[in-house]
Image (cartoon, grey):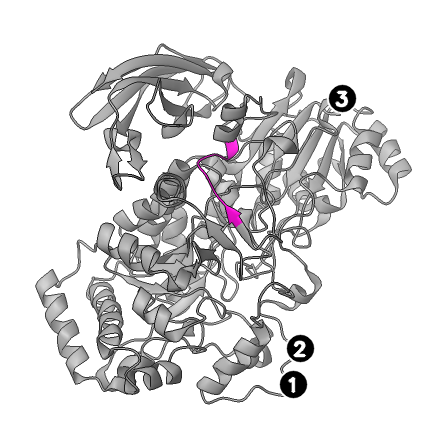
Amino acid sequence: MFKKDDCTLDREQVEEKAQALLEQMTLKEKVWMLNGNWDIFGNLEKYQNGYNPVPIETNGCPRLGISPIAFTDGPRGIVMGHSTCFPVSMARGASFEPGLEKRIGDVIGKEARAQGANYFGGVCINLLRHPAWGRSQETYGEDPFLLGEMGKALTEGVQAHNVIACVKHYAVNNIENSRFWVNVKADERTMREIYLPHFKKSIDAGAASVMGAYNLFNDDHCCESHTLLTDILRDDWGFEGFVISDFVAGVRDTKKAIEAGLDIEMPMPIHYQRNLLKAVEEGRVSEENVNTAVLRILRTLLVFENTPEKMAYSMDLVASKEHTELAREVAEKSMVLIKNAKGVLPFQKTVKRILVAGELGNRANTGDAGSSKIDAPHVVTPLEGFRNYFRAGAEIVFCDESDLDKAANEAARADCVIIAVGNDMHDEGEYIGPDTNDDFSFMEAVVKGYDNMGKSVPGSGADFSIAAPDQESSEGGDRKSLSLKPAQIELIKRIASINPNTVVLLVGGGMIMTKEWDDMVPAIVYGWYSGMEGGNALSRILFGDVNPSGKLPFTIPQDQSHLPYFSNTDPEITYDLYHGYSYLDKHGHTPAYPFGFGLSYTTWEYGEPQIDKQDDHVTVTVNLKNTGGVAGAEVVQVYIGKKQSAIDRQKKLLKGFKKVYLEPGQSTTVSIPVALDELRYFSNELRKWIFEPGTYSFYVGSSSDEADLQVKEVELA
């Protein structure tokens, strides 16, 4: 349930006021509360951006002073105006630092309020089941525990500024191109243990809204699933906020949606408003369903609007110096050093000639061009970052993939080489395209929404973009390849061996296979889509001002066959308990780079872990020492598995982590509590959570690879 401890109204007062408002409303006013009023074409004409340049508002009830819900999207930041553009969520997952994510939420809350929004639809916590998923950049990684901790932190940061946080896309939304029609099958245990716990954690932390997903779950569209929206979300978890649909295609049936527990159809009334009013008037839908939905919205608004403001929210907050500096800090703490043979990094600051090779080294590239796109006031590219860093102190040379001979010549002359390769909005991201497996038409739905709002679509309405103008030139969607492009691989093969001071910079929002070229380069850094300050952050990482501390939020396998099955053309797909590192553990595959892995410019020494059991939790303690010559941060990770279980279980799962900053020679004792509830499994037969007594293996160390872990076995009853 959502909580606002500093709300000036108690629960009884909230309920009394909500009921009083409901009783004064006409049926039409109540129904009109339950939809958005998206004006794509008006936005295009006025802002040259069809999607979300200003808040997308519901109707509210002006006669009674009831505010509209004013929606803004994310999660790179606020998509309206020229807001602060942070690194994508996947990069932030690599920070393994919930406290940092809460600070990002604080900025997002401030910038939302400054631009007139009271609702943030950007707490994306869908699981990365397979790295081909086109929107992997919008979530935090492959592990449910990591997702839950980061989503909880973002929720708390945003809602501190009386902005309603929405967690999405509920649920099993893990494929992009078939998202409107794919039917995901999963048993209850798989859902409860793998695909839902992070949603529950964010809701327990106070998230006041949930967005349903496009796809079907066990034969029902998620926005029409009574199992998801009522049985689990409300009856089991006690959620008291309201649920909105995913945009345009989320609702297909008026009666099914409202009766399942879908409160607001966004972003426009395709199946609600006039259709819902008619359904109630004709007796096909009970007015009580409408009353219930309206009350959920009223209660939420009353809580948020009766919580004292922390500050004044003015436009000078948006992309302010403080927020921009945080964007750089986040980029620095998110970058992951996965290879550093012979300590080639950090480069010496005395270099006089630097080669930046690869088109992406000179491209503003902050992620896809879909609903999460931000038009930042500036974007620092890698090339610009090096120029900013050295000013006139070094010559920075740039070559792209089109002239390999020139690149080779420059590599031989340079003191160090940065090869920037990876993806952009053409390779991955949100996708709206022809849907051959579904009778749904996006454009026809938009036209219907305009008609229901009493508006006309200007002209033919055939040519429009839901985002910025460059949306039309981007394909996005699920990835066709998990490897680099052939031209990028050729660039690496041609120049990597020429200069011993060479690093490959991986740009993107997800996992990139490295096996085709890995052994040719001494150093590899995951730079991600690193936000508006990414270029400045990169230079500080590569030249040693900042010690890299990111950890991979996914597994990089040695071979794609070590991943679970993925298809974006199958009409139906079944999910089970295994993906990512748990899938590799089950099948005995050694990863190329494991989940949780990341190198540092310093060295770390772990003491022997100790396990102390209390009534409802276990505390893992371990001594950590910085044994190198520079300050740095290490992420201590705790994985737990059950020996000789009576049921099929993963060998180990992440159940705790903590990022620790230490000076050279400094040591500290790290304590990580693990609730015993985290060790339970869900019984499909009994339909309840069960703790299984017996021997548990506690793995403590620096990644999910058992070579990086110490194991302690403990009897738990």
Indicate yes or no whether the magenta region holds residue 577. yes
- Secondary structure under badge 3? loop
Q: Which labelled disc corresponds to residue 89?
A: none
Residue plotted at (35% across, 54% down): 158
The residue to which callout 1 is attached is 460
- Secondary structure under badge 2? loop
Image: 220 above or below 35: above
Q: Amino acid at mark 3?
A: Pro
Q: Is residue 132 left or right of residue 690?
A: right
First reached walking from the N terminus: tag 2 or tag 3 = 2
Q: CA distance from mark 2 to mark 3?
A: 51 Å
Q: Which labelled disc corresponds to residue 463?
A: 2
Residue closer to the observer: 29 or 637: 29
Q: Amino acid at mark 2?
A: Asp
Q: Is residue 23 left or right of residue 519?
A: left
Q: Tell me which segment is drawn in magenta.
A: 573-580
Residue 482 at x, y = what percent?
A: 67, 40
Q: Is residue 313 visible?
A: no
Residue plotted at (27% across, 27% down): 673
Query: Decide: marks 1, 2 in contact (CB < 8 A)?
Result: yes
The residue to which callout 3 is attached is 500
**Residue found at the very far front of the displayed protein:** 685
Q: CA distance from mark 1 to mark 2?
A: 8 Å
Residue 175 at x, y = what percent?
A: 55, 51
Q: Residues within 10 Å of mark 1 (few under 14, many from 20)?
A: few
- Viewer-nearest of discs 1 and 3: 1
Residue 425 at x, y = what percent?
A: 65, 54
Q: Residues within 10 Å of mark 2 (few under 14, many from 20)?
A: few
- Quadrant placement of the N terminus: bottom left
First reached walking from the N terminus: tag 1 or tag 3 = 1
